[in-house]
């Protein structure tokens, strides 16, 4: 008996109902803002936090959610002979 291998192909698709999200994080104390769709809102949190605490080092991260799905590149191919 011979083994037949078939490799799966996957693709990523950005979730349509989720836009890019932003999080501001204080690198001095580790506190962070709630993720938001507005980069300005995340930066504003960093500035308010700096004013309240005196902390000076921050990081801003942007992220987006994706879904993985399997594609079938052989679906329209002719059967093997």
Image: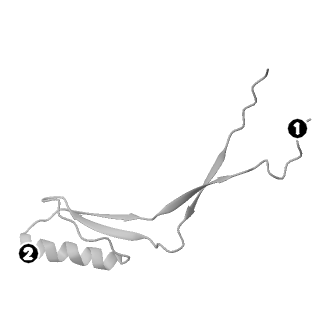
Categorize mark 1 by other alpha carbons within 10 Å: few (<14), some (14-19), many (20+).
few
Can you tell which mark lies on residue 52? 2
Nearest the viewer among 14 and 41 is 14
Q: Residue at x 46, y 73 (%)?
A: 19
68 vs 26, left or right, is right
Residue labelled with disc 1: 80
15 vs 73, left or right, is left
11 vs 40, left or right, is right
Q: Position of residue 29 (x, y in %)?
A: 12, 59
Q: Quick one: label 2 or label 1, which is nearer the N terminus?
A: 2
On the image, which quarter does residue 64 sit in? bottom left
- Quick one: SS at disc 2? helix
Marks 2 and 1: CB-CB under 8 Å? no
State the count of labels. Answer: 2
Q: Position of residue 80 (x, y in %)?
A: 88, 38
- Picture quarter with the N terminus: top right
Categorize mark 2 by other alpha carbons within 10 Å: few (<14), some (14-19), many (20+).
few
Nearest the viewer among 27 and 36 is 36
């Amino acid at each position: 008996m011979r083994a037949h291998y078939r490799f799966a192909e996957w693709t990523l698709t950005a979730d349509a109902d989720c836009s890019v999200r932003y999080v501001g994080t204080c690198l001095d104390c580790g506190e962070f803002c709630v993720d938001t769709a507005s980069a300005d809102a995340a930066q504003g949190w960093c500035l308010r936090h700096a004013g309240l605490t005196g902390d000076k080092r921050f990081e801003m991260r942007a992220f987006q959610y994706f879904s993985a799905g399997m594609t079938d590149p052989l679906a329209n191919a002719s059967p093997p002979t």
